[in-house]
Amino acid sequence: YQTLGEEYVSIIQVDPSKRRIPSRMRRTALIFFHTFVPYLLDKVLICIENELEAEAPQSSHQQMSRTWRPLSHVRLWIQRAVGMLTESQRKSLIPLVFALQQGITLLYRLHVAVFYITGAFYHIGKRASGVSY
């Protein structure tokens, strides 16, 4: 349950009760919030930005590959949603997506600043899953 660094300084991850090690579900949530959520959020926002900046909406009847690719399904859903917008709506949403991307970056920086002040929860994933040392 310990990384080499955690073993070296004799610390262990615990759940919110501070008496038990995190359950598998809590550790799975930590991994999900720490790795997959930021990745998927970044990919979805980039896809939305690309679709909004495209000159003409692409056909939503593009051929899907035979392999299961979740991001291709998300991309198709985004293409359909953006296809229903007017040109002026699309142009007005571009700054909003950019502001959201910058806001997420600012949130991460603010969270690290709060960590340096309080000394708890270096990663947002640990705060969301309740895992501490």
Image (cartoon, rainbow, N blue to C red):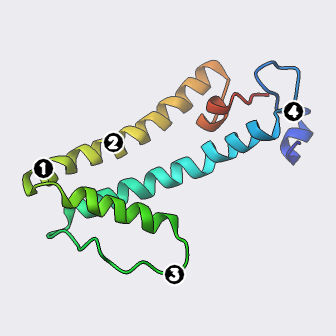
Residue 35, horizontal then vertical, whole percent: 61, 50
Q: Earlier in the sequence, mark 1 or mark 3?
A: 3
User: Depth-wise, is mark 3 or mark 4 nearer the camera?
Assistant: 3
Residue at x-position 84% and y-position 43%: 5
Estimate the spatial distance between the alpha carbons at disc 2 and disc 4, rounded to whole Å: 35 Å
Residue 114, horizontal then vertical, whole percent: 55, 24
Whether tag 3 and tag 4 are in contact, CB under 8 A, the answer is no
Left or right: residue 93 versus residue 103 is left
| Element type where label 4 sits in the image | loop
| Element type where label 2 sits in the image | helix
Q: Is residue 28 above or below residue 91?
A: above
Disc 3 marks which residue?
66
Q: Which mark is residue 12?
A: 4
Estimate the spatial distance between the alpha carbons at disc 1 and disc 3, rounded to whole Å: 34 Å
Disc 2 marks which residue?
100
Q: Earlier in the sequence, mark 1 or mark 2?
A: 1
